Amino acid sequence: MLEARGLGKDYQGRQVLQCIDLQICEGDVLCLIGPRGAGKTTLLRLLDLLEKPSGGELYFNGVNVTFSERLRLQVRRRMSFVLQKPIVFSGSVRDNIAYGLKWRGEASKLVRKKTEYILELVGIADYADREAKTLSGGEMQLVALARALVTEPEVLFLDEPTANLDPVSGAKIEAILARLIESRKMTIVMATHDMAQGQRLANRIGVLMSGRLLQIGSPVEIFCLPASKEIAEFVGVENILSGSVTEKNGGLATISVGEVTFEVVTSCNVGDLVWAIIRPEDITFARVKELSSARNVFQGKITRMATVGALVRVEVDCGFTLLGVLTKKSADDMGIEPGVDVYASFKASAVHIIKR
Amino acid sequence: MLGVMVILFVVGCTASAARAPLFPAAERIRVATTTSLYDTGLWGHLEPMFEKKYKVELDILYAGTGIAFEYGKRCDVDAIVTHDKAREEKFVADGYGVNRIPFAYNHFLIIGPPEDPANVKGLSPEEAFKRLAETKAGSFVSRGDESGTHVKEKEIWGAAGFEHETVRKSGAWYIEAGRGMGPTLLMASEKNAYTLTDAGTFLAYKGKLDLVPLVDKGAILLNVYSVIAVNPEKCPKVNIEIANNLINFLTSPEIQKFIGEYGVAEYGTGLFIPCAGAELEIQ
Amino acid sequence: MVELWHAFIKALELIASLDSEVMEITRRSLAISVTSCSITSLICVPLGSLIHFNRFPGKSVLINVIQTFYSFPTVVVGLFVFVLLSRTGPLGELGLLFTPVAIVVGQVLLIMPIMIGLTISALSGIDGSVVETAMSLGASRTQASILALKEARFAVLTAVIMCFGRAISEVGLSIMVGGNIKGFTRTLTTAISLESSKGDIELSLALGVILLTLALMVNLLIGWLQRR
């Protein structure tokens, strides 16, 4: 549906985006994640045809829409954008929503019907006649969303839709989006730095860093199989250890990490320098050395513990630092506390290897 | 609704402002006149009379002789009425004007504060000026605007043996007003100063002034008003027909009589003496 | 003080008696200034909008120049227009000198910089994302600019008031290019100038009161529009 080829954008000599190749199909919910300044907003703006790229091309349903002003306006009218900090126009909420339709020249009867429908859908019918500028941040964002939806866009762009909102309003917005995704199979492209949100709503995630699209795939791929150290760090993988491949036996390999060795599954060859990435959730703890299928078992001392919600994050010193996570109950049951000795184990298949 | 009213209002104003030049109702003639004739109110009477007789719109520009010549050279007026013989003759000689037609005259006066600090009463104009410059006993307000009156003032300075430029810079006692005759009189009165004025304007303003005539005799004080039609050869757009009508009007016996009697009832004596056609020698 | 009070009374008398000459010059002042203001608004509000929303080399220099012309002396503008419209000047063929149209032309030139400059100011005062948001909702550039002007309408209408005030209160230009011709190009301000120089202070003050009243009425009208 929407395709970007080699898209790039620079502002006054600063390269904000480069070599972006992206395809968005109908029904996709693509979430762009990345640190601030990565270029997420810029990419959304280019995709929504709000700005012209400095390089590369954009196609909508196969038609090149990069250059012609007329085409751009036409296609832009088939899409909608909700900005990060929504601004509302003077007038009532109803007036605000009606603008998009009026600009497209729709008949006033139709405008009224569609406006009423959207007010109901988004759940803001109660303050339809209030001055839009007197609303709270959360309410304004709902109005912005309603404004964007009333024109029945084929693609909806959202830039950090819940970033500036309190949790209650944020949840409301997410609920509406989830409903739209489910009932209408709406195509959505959204930027966020809340990865949990990305995981909840999206079927595809793209990682943008320093203006480049480093990886794009399903949530599982991104979070469990990050393609690079930077991505791993960003998505919250905390055990990133450097090592090299010393032995290889079919799919199984041995890597040396500092003074110890791990058994891992990888296609890398002997001599390759690698990063070993282990998710905290994949580490199991025991007070006693147990017989398990895990090929990697290390003994160590608990150095630090921190409670996060219902979970406990544990830092173990086994000659190298390992970060794991336990439920509070398990921790209590096992008597795990700082200073205590434990055995940390993980499967060979749990170690994700990235060539350095 | 109010929006419609506002628009109508604006359109109405535009139409009103644009009316005259875009949809001329009647023919127009523009005349630049010396301020002294205007300030006496004479034009106020002559204008409607002329307009009625010839069925044209007469536009009077309160100009001052200096700028009147400039308007004439630029073809922005159809006729000029001034009182500076030398420049008028040059204007005609240079081809800007058709002919110089004197139609009325009076005299200039040197007026000043009743106390007469410089003691110029009864002197000749040249001697009076000499005393003013030497004693600086009182202020002098000059027209300072290249008008006929101003040019006459410079002439008297010259006759008294002074370079006007020197007099201008000789002290704070010499004030250049840069305004018309009426306003200059008011300023002089305000400052209790001496000034040169034509008799007509002085009489018309007498009630508002605290100044009295001190010097009124002297050949150099002759003040002749003439009308000149702008030359259609240099200015093709000039309405020469109506300009000539104006000349005929000013020199007609009826109007000449009117001019001669103007002011008698109000001020006791006429402000002007008609002299149609006749070239006056300096008496 | 007594003089001012007398002037006020005289003003009321002139208005109540519908003195024909005073009515005439009042009508003319209003007609000329409303016309200049309207023409200038029609040209300069879109022009200011264009300058504000587009990037081009020399933009800040242009805005600086415009702002410099805010307080250009009226007599100088008058002189310029005089030379332009004089029969011997480039536009002499039109024969517009010493007519109300000449005054309109002069006033338009006089207030153009103010109108453009203040429109740009007004638009700078609204949130930068207004145009963007509008465009993201499908507005064309023109539609978005019109919306921006609507959002800034308070400040834009203030600009109109300022321009009207400057137009109706200027003297130098009206005298120079209008000629202060009785019955034709005499306005309230030129009449005040003439009457006061002739010494009729009371009449001048009275005319001044009428002028102020006019300005007040126009202000109220635009104030009403601002609130809508």
Image (cartoon, coloured by chain):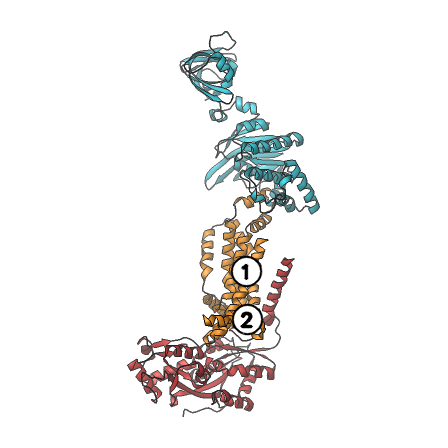
Chain colours: A cyan, B red, C orange
Q: Residues within 10 Å of mark 1 (few under 14, many from 20)?
A: some
Q: Amino acid at mark 2?
A: Leu
Rendered location of residue B139, percent (x, y): 34, 78
Residue at x-position 52% and y-position 45%: C128
Please count the marks in the image: 2
Q: Residues within 10 Å of mark 2 (few under 14, many from 20)?
A: some
* Residue nearest the viewer, comparing A307 with C139: A307
Number of the label disc, if any, that sits on residue C219? 1
Q: Nearer the viewer, mark 1 or mark 2?
A: 2
Q: Amino acid at mark 1?
A: Asn
Would residue C97 be seen by someone viewing this image from the given angle?
Answer: no
* Residue nearest the viewer, comparing B234 with B177: B177
Subunit bearing disc 2? C
Number of the label disc, if any, that sits on residue A297? none
Residue furthest right as drawn: A109
Q: Is residue B57 above or below residue A67?
A: below
Relative placement, left or right, of C213 versus B64 is right
Q: According to the image, label 2 marks what residue?
A: C12
Q: From the image, which quarter does the N terminus of chain C lie in?
A: bottom left
- Callout 1: helix, strand or loop? helix
* Residue nearest the viewer, comparing B91 with B181: B181
Q: Earlier in the sequence, mark 1 or mark 2?
A: 2
Rendered location of residue B30, percent (x, y): 54, 78
Would residue A251 be seen by someone viewing this image from the given angle?
Answer: yes
Subunit bearing disc 1? C
Rendered location of residue B108, percent (x, y): 41, 86
